[in-house]
Amino acid sequence: MPQMSPMWWTSIMMMFVMMLMVFITMIYFSKMEESKKIKIKMIKNKSMNWKW
């Protein structure tokens, strides 16, 4: 059993690291999408102002 334990721990750590990386990338992309939406809104507002 002592030989199995380290492998199990490393596998759990690897899973945790993978989850963390996926989480960080998701947050990063969501922030980028939000900034894009804000830019699009600003552009739309400018175009509306131009029309007026």
Image (cartoon, grey):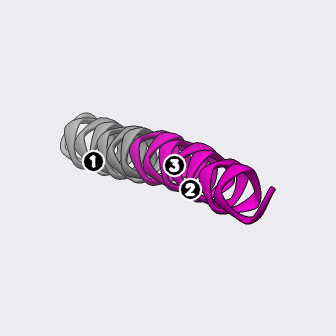
Residue contact between numbered discs 2 and 3, judged by CB atoms under 8 Å: yes
Secondary structure found at label 2: helix
Name the mark on residue 49: none
Asked if one can make out residue 41 in the rendered structure from this viewpoint, the answer is yes
Who's the residue at 27% across and 47% down the image?
Answer: 14
Look at mark 2 in the image and give the residue it sits on.
43
Nearest to viewer (mark 2 / mark 3): 2
Quarter holding the N terminus? top left
- Percent coordinates x, y for residue 26 in the rendering: 49, 52
Instruction: Answer left or right for 32 relative to 4.
Output: right
- Percent coordinates x, y for residue 5 in the rendering: 31, 37
Magenta region includes residue 3: no
Dot 3: within a 10 Å radius of its alpha carbon, few (fewer than 14), some, or many (20 or more) residues? Answer: few
The residue segment tinted magenta is: 27-52
Who's the residue at 72% across and 49% down the image?
Answer: 49
The one of 22 and 8 positioned closer to us in this rendering: 22
- Percent coordinates x, y for residue 43 in the rendering: 56, 56
Name the mark on residue 39: 3
Q: Which amino acid does label 1 sit on?
A: Met
Dot 3 or dot 1, earlier in sequence:
1
Dot 1 or dot 2, earlier in sequence:
1
